[in-house]
Image: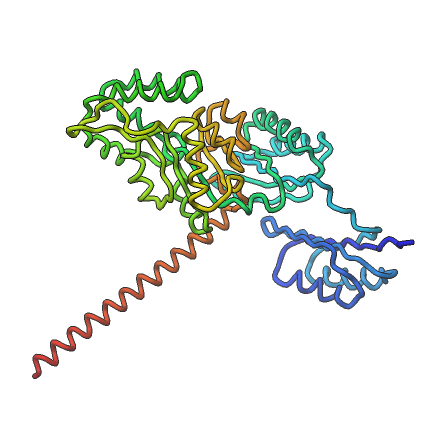
Amino acid sequence: MNVPQTTLLVTLTGRDRPGVTARLFSVLARHQLDVIDAEQVVIRGRLVLGVLLGCAGPPDLTAIHRAVSGVAADLGLEAEITAGTGDEPRRRGRLHVTVLGRPLTPAAIAAIAGQIAAGGANIDRIGRLAHRPVTCIELDVSGADPPALRAALTREATQQQVDVAVQPGGLHRRAMRLVVMDVDSTLVQDEVIDLLAARAGCAEQVAKLTTAAMGGQLDFTTSLRERVALLAGLDQRVLDDVRRDLRLAPGARTLIRTLRRLGYKCGIVSGGFVQVIEPLAIELGIDYVAANELEISGGVLTGHLSGPVIDRAGKAAALHRFCEQAGVPVSQAVAVGDGANDLDMIAAAGLGIAFNAKQVVKDAADAAVSVPFLDSILYLLGISREDVEAADMEAASVEAAEMAAGDIAAWDVAARDVEARDVEAAD
């Protein structure tokens, strides 16, 4: 008969300081103990350190308690030791639940946690991914039914005016290698065709057609051809003006810069126009581009398109094409969009994200983000704000060092030139 293993849970709490972990494990090392689990959290200088230990035989609880209490007293901490039997296994069905708010209130967290408990699930761990300009926390949840929990938390998020994403736990997010985004009202704040229409004097007609198409009330291809026809006669130089006037979504540069540093490939797929989109992609360092092409003749727009239309099906086809070019399965791709013509690519991707999207897109996506910061998508990939800022600081230091080295090299060249001229003059 197997005898259940005795376990000890040692918890230290109080003001954090260097060396706490080393001191605790040093005194534990004097006893015949195995480390089963350990977790440490520091919030505003307050420490909670928990260590679960296993004992092959009966532990000397008196000696262990005396040693741990002595270290705690010396460090100004409080100690607690609880004995038990066996290590409760982690429950199956682990999920990541990401909660974003601006602000994120205690009431919202209480409501989300209540829904998790009501579904018979347990919160195993809570961590913070960001605190500005949005607050984002992540909960590791076990024992949940994923579809049921996602539905319950989606309803609760609407009530609490926060964003909630539910994703499979484990290695799922770490496998993502390609991010493909819509452009209009996603990567940029504008609708390109609306900007062109304003210059062509048909803004009101085009805006109505755009709204109907993005909301799914009008076939996208038909709508696009009708809108492009209204641009007939517009000078092609206006395309450059519109490109210069485009406003990137807040956080767009941070998102793409961070993804590239981490080795992700990035693509954009747009129902807009390649003449405007491609220069933007080059500027940002985006790897793949798919967009419609305006027909131009004699320096003016003809009111027609060249080549196939990038519509709802075309966006999904572009996602598959980008995956093939990147050597990435579609299950490891992220798709981000806001309109009805993004639905197919959002459904096809391993993770589909609705960004400030129409309700029909929110309902279909794996996750919905309603805060205006595009780099919030990083949090859904488990990348924290601190990680992003640390990478930016490191890159800035490297750039400064390279610039300094360049200045020194330039000074050396100039000095050698002066020396050569002096020698030549002396000769």
Q: How is the protein colored in the picture?
A: rainbow
Left or right: 44 as drawn, with respect to 242: right
Instruction: Give the number of callouts.
Output: 0
Q: Residue at x 75, y 66 (%)?
A: 29
Query: Left or right: where does residue 306 sit relative to residue 328?
Result: left
On the picture, is 380 further left or further right than 192?
right
Q: Nearer the viewer, residue 277 or 84?
A: 277
- Residue 399 seen in render: yes
Q: Nearer the viewer, residue 376 or 365?
A: 365
Q: Where is residue 357 in the image (x, y as percent from the top left)?
A: 46, 27
| Residue 131 visible to the viewer | no
Q: Image point 47% across, 36% down: which residue?
A: 335
x and y, in percent, of residue 86 in the image? 82, 51
* Whether residue 158 is situated above or below residue 44 in the rendered picture: above
Residue 354 rendering spot, x and y as whole percentages: 49, 31
Placement of 159 over or under 325, stated as above or below:
above
